[in-house]
Image (cartoon, rainbow, N blue to C red):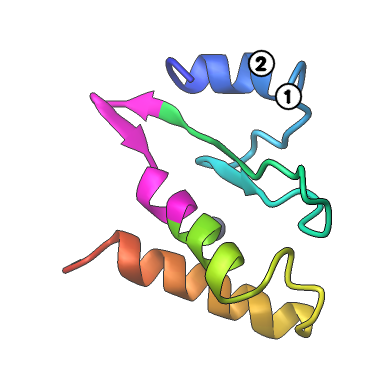
Amino acid sequence: MKNKDHYHRYGNYPFRIDTNNGGIYIEGNSNNPNNQPRIFVYMKDNNIHNFGHEIVHYLDGKYNKYGDANMFPSEEITWWSEGLAEYISHGKK
Ligand SMILES: [Zn+2]
């Protein structure tokens, strides 16, 4: 979205996402062949804020977790997902 204000204003309606974050990845129902995963982010300082983090979640869901991670214990998969996204998206930091 254009900026954080738009993210807060339009995130809940019409997109029905939580906006108490810096962006979000929504897997959807990965068992549905017509499923369309979605990434919601916004512009900040001429950059797409947290896009690197959210695209890692997308790739992780597609190639590692096989969807929304129901096949793994939730605490362990959250540790994996967030750690991987932060590690890769922040590079040398
Ligand atoms: Zn994350």
Q: Does the beta carbon of the residue at mark 1 sit less than 8 Å from ligand 1? A: no
Q: Name the residue: 60% across, 47% down.
A: 25
* The label number, if any, that marks residue 87 in the structure image: none
Give the image location of residue 21, x and y in percent: 58, 42
* The label number, if any, that marks residue 10 in the structure image: 2
Q: What amino acid does circle 1 point to?
A: Phe
> Mark 2 Cα within 10 Å, few/some/many (few <14, many 20+)?
some
Q: Name the residue: 75% across, 45% down.
A: 35
Check disc 1 and report its element: helix, strand or loop: loop
Dot 2 and dot 1 residues touching (CB under 8 Å): yes
Give the image location of residue 27, x and y in percent: 69, 52
Pick the front one: 70 or 30: 30
23 horizontally vs 88: left or right: right
Query: Looking at the picture, does residue 82 appear above or below residue 29?
Result: below
Tell me where residue 40 sits by quadrant. Answer: top right
Q: What amino acid does circle 2 point to?
A: Tyr
Tell me where residue 2 sits by quadrant. Answer: top left
77 horizontally vs 59: left or right: right
Check disc 2 and report its element: helix, strand or loop: helix
Pick the front one: 20 or 36: 36
Query: Looking at the picture, does residue 57 appear above or below residue 2?
Result: below
| Residue 3 lies in the magenta stretch | no
Ligand 1 shows up in which quadrant of the image? bottom right
Query: Which badge, 2 or 1, comes first in the chain's sequence?
Result: 2
> Mark 1 Cα within 10 Å, few/some/many (few <14, many 20+)?
few
Q: Name the residue: 16% across, 69% down.
A: 92
Q: Of all residues shown, which one is farthest toward the front?
A: 33
Which span is picked out in magenta? Answer: 43-55
Give the image location of residue 23, x and y in percent: 53, 40
60 horizontally vs 53: left or right: right
Q: Which residue is mark 1?
A: 15
